[in-house]
Image (cartoon, rainbow, N blue to C red):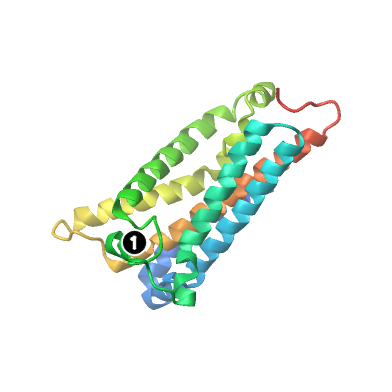
Amino acid sequence: MATRRGVWVIALTPAAFWIWSLWLARANDDAFFALTKEDGLIENAQAVVFLASALVAASIAWAFRARRRMGWAAAYGMAALALLWVAGEEISWGQRLMGFETITPLRQVNTQGEMTLHNIPGVTAVLVRLLWLALAAAIVLSGILWTLSRERQRRWAIRWWMPHPALIPAWLSIFSYDGLRRWYHWRHPSEQQVSWLVSRLQEPRELSLAGAILVFLWMVRREVVSESCAPGIPLHR
């Protein structure tokens, strides 16, 4: 379990990063656009962090497999594959770096004309809704379930699947981007799309999401390892 200082760092860092991103977008848009451009620092950082998350999820799956907890191993194995897919999507599977062409069926339906699935309008809508549901559940349930007794948390394996409440500021920061887009449309009702500046705020938001997922998985891994190694404390049945 994280120390009290670690909890404060986890809680404050994503909120501070999001506030800094908003400030930079207003104070120095040239620097902001340079950081958030396609294949820029922030987008490449997203891919690296998602890849790191995939590796941590795979290590959790391996730890569960070694303890013959096959259901949990399968769940985190699938999470590792999903995160690997996200990492690839973030950099268009290296398309812009290597310069290969998008196949015709994808080019016709992809909003950016790239070799990605998440930029297909129907897929985008589904992913956005799933993200909303996941964020809402994490914000509400983590604050409730982590107040249960240690014994009940162990019995329900809370720490193996529910993020720590210290991550609530991260989920709120990520969630707030949708509110920002709604606020922009309210201020500019004649515009069908948000401004390019507001649109590029998607990049620091996604980096915050990647970082929060990595922290969550790292905390799960520590919990699994510490509980399995503790003398006299069996793994959950």
Q: Residue 188, position in %: x, y? A: 18, 59
Q: Residue at x 18, y 59 (%)?
A: 192
The residue nearer to you, when weighing 119 against 150, is 119
The answer to whether 38 appears left or right of 121 in the picture is: right
How many other residues sit within 10 Å of disc 1, few (<14), some (14-19) or many (≥20)? some
Q: Residue 221, position in %: x, y? A: 69, 43
Q: Residue 113, position in %: x, y? A: 33, 67
Q: Residue at x 39, y 55 (%)?
A: 118
Q: Determine the image quadrant of residue 136.
A: top left
Q: Residue at x 57, y 39 (%)?
A: 163
Up the image or down, 28 lies above or below 57; here it is below
Residue that numbered label 1 is attached to: 106
Q: Residue 197, position in %: x, y? A: 32, 67
The answer to whether 221 appears left or right of 145 in the picture is: right
Which quadrant, please, contains the N terminus? top right
The answer to whether 223 appears left or right of 198 in the picture is: right
| Residue at the right extreme of this rendering | 231
